[in-house]
Image (spheres, rainbow, N blue to C red):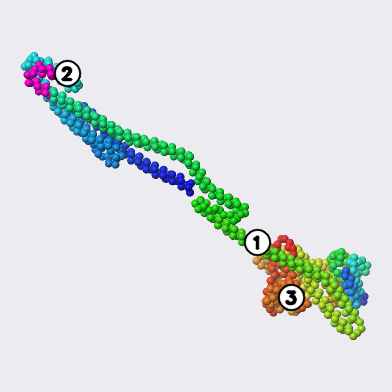
Amino acid sequence: MIGISIPSFIALIGGILTYEYINDVKKRQELVLIADDLKEHVLEVRRNEKNFLHYKNEEYFNNLKAETSALTGSINGISLKNKKKIDADSLSLLQKLNQSYLRLIDDLYKNYQQETAVIEQVRTEGRKLETLSESGKYSPKLSVSSVLHLRLLEKNYMLFRDKNSLNALNNSLSEMKNLTPSCYECTPYIDALHNLMTLNEKSDSIVNELQATGNEFERITGEIARHEKQYIDSFFTLTQRLILLTLVLLCTLGPLFVYKTASYIAAPTKRLSDIIKKISDGDISLRAPLKEHDETYSLAMSFNAMLDDLQFTQESLGKSLTLLHEKQKQLILETETLASLGKFAVGVAHEINNPLAIINEKTGLMKDIIEVSDDFPIKNKLLDILSGISNSVSRCRVITHRLLGFARRTDAEYERIDINNLIKDVYGFLEKEIFYKSIQLNLNLKENLPVFQSDKVQLQQVFLNIIKNAIDAVEIKGIIDVSTDIKNGNIIRVSVRDNGCGIPEKIHKHIFDPFFTTKEKGKGTGLGLSLTYGIVKKLGGNISVESEVNKGATFIVDIPINTPPTKKHI
Amino acid sequence: MKPSKVLIVDDETEFASTLAERLRLRGYDAKAICNAGDIFTIAKNDPPDVILLDLKMPGMSAIEILMTIKGIAPKVKVILLTGHLNLEDKIEGIRINNFTYIMKPVDIKELTEKIDSVLEKNKKE
């Protein structure tokens, strides 16, 4: 933020100052124009002044007066504001001078008019004096030559109007007065000349004053113009320096600001990236630092929210995993317990079966011998007792045979299986029993079922057990339906339905428990369905039962087509 | 009519001899041996009609014994005696097509029926 705001602030201030400054200079330009205008007018006045002093006639008098009035107009036309800005004192002085100048030219012109008149008078009186001298009235004091000499001096004076010619004329007049004091006709000429001299003197003094005023005009306006020029010059100098300063600032502070700004943005980004690295190394409890005025504030916020979610998910995953491990351990323990129980049962059954066989044969032999011997008092009683032993042996036989059912291969061996062929094989094993009991067994085998990998022998045992159960459940002339199908494209389903006595709902959940049986005493071991259940589960499948009392039961076995590729051990 | 010759092969002497005696009482020419190695000599020199063979004989598997007997004396019928018949053995036995079995402890009536049944079959063949 600072990285952007500081240069922007400087640019804004600089912009405002420059604008104000340029505006000021623009206004100053107006003053320069005014100063130029004044100077121009003054020059024009001075030019006309020269002409007027030279020609001394009405035309040039009017010209001069018009120009002087124009100057007056110019001065008066300046606004009060501008006057203050230029130099109010100089301007008011200029105004006063202008007024006195106007008065002076008026005076001068009047004087010139008088001079003209007096000069005419001098000439007239001069010609009269010539005539007088020619008459010889005051001869020889007033000779023609002396009068002509006087007229010559008079002309010289009028022509040169310098001191020498004035002195020469005055001397000559004094000489004439002295020679002819009684000549009253001479007096007008002398008076007229003196009069002219006085007027000339006055004119000269006015001219001097006029020129002094004119010079003062030039000095003041020149001063004003120079002052404005200086101001503009100083503006350019200042601008020059300002540009130089800006360049220096840009070259030095610019990179500094860029560096500061870059680090201002880079620093939080780096902090964030450091945190991300630490988190990716495993410490998920870390959070990105939050600085409210940071460029990365919202990024860090979102990042932290994401981390919260992640941590939560990770924790719940961890919990689930722990739970799963516990369940798995429990399951393994259960499986191991079952497996060792199975091995134990097999061992016991084996050990018992052989002596049992011997007991059976010995008892049988005793019966045989007694049966073929002659009658004796306790013959029948002994035969009864022996039959009791035989029956008990038979019961034991059923139990040991069932227990030995555990002695199966512990590794599942996977091979390609066509479920329909497998069912037909099982049917083959049971064909005679079915025939003897007049059971109607229908095979509804769906054609073109996919071939899948599973343990053939164990699957045969599964269906052997289930179908044998069905055979036991139905009365003579019962009906059993065995059907195959495919479910969801990846599960082979085999249903075995019988129309037997059915299974009461309250024992549904117990039928797969070991040693649970509903068969009459001595006929069932309660191990068949338990074994079947174990095998189906081991092969990754599922077994369930649907039943209604007195209507029959349906066992449903689902076997996945995608069996696990690894061998399972129990 | 000459009595049928039955040879009982079982490592349980008590069982084998008692069963033999019971069969003799029922009119069979029954004999018991405990050593599996003797089977082949007897089968060659004095072939019985039926051999009752315990599956769990030491030294050889029942299937091997079955195959050997079939080679020496093809007409001899074999009934397997077993405490527990493995399903694989059952299937293998069916495959070699010379096979009947009976579970120990045996029911004497069931046994004599089986013996008579295989001998009847033999006569037909």
Report the residue marked by disc 3. Answer: A517
**Quadrant hosting residue A164:** top left
Residue furthest out toward the top: A140
User: For this view, does B83 lie left or right of residue A315?
Assistant: right
> Where residue A1 appears, x then y in whole percent?
48, 49
In the rendered structure, which disc, 2 or 1, sits on the residue that comes first in sequence? 2
Q: Characterize the magenta stretch by its predominant secondary structure.
A: helix
Q: Nearer the viewer, residue A334 or A45?
A: A334
Q: Residues within 10 Å of mark 1 (few under 14, many from 20)?
A: few
Secondary structure type for disc 3: loop
Subunit under mark 2: A
Q: Is residue A34 among what the camera can see?
A: no
Report the residue marked by disc 2. Answer: A168
Residue interval drawn in magenta: A164-192
Q: CA distance from mark 3 to mark 2?
A: 181 Å
Q: Is residue A557 magenta?
A: no
Marks 2,1: beta carbons within 8 A: no
Residue that appears at 21% across and 33% down: A100
User: For this view, does A284 lie left or right of residue A52?
Assistant: right
Callout 3 and callout 1 share a chain: yes
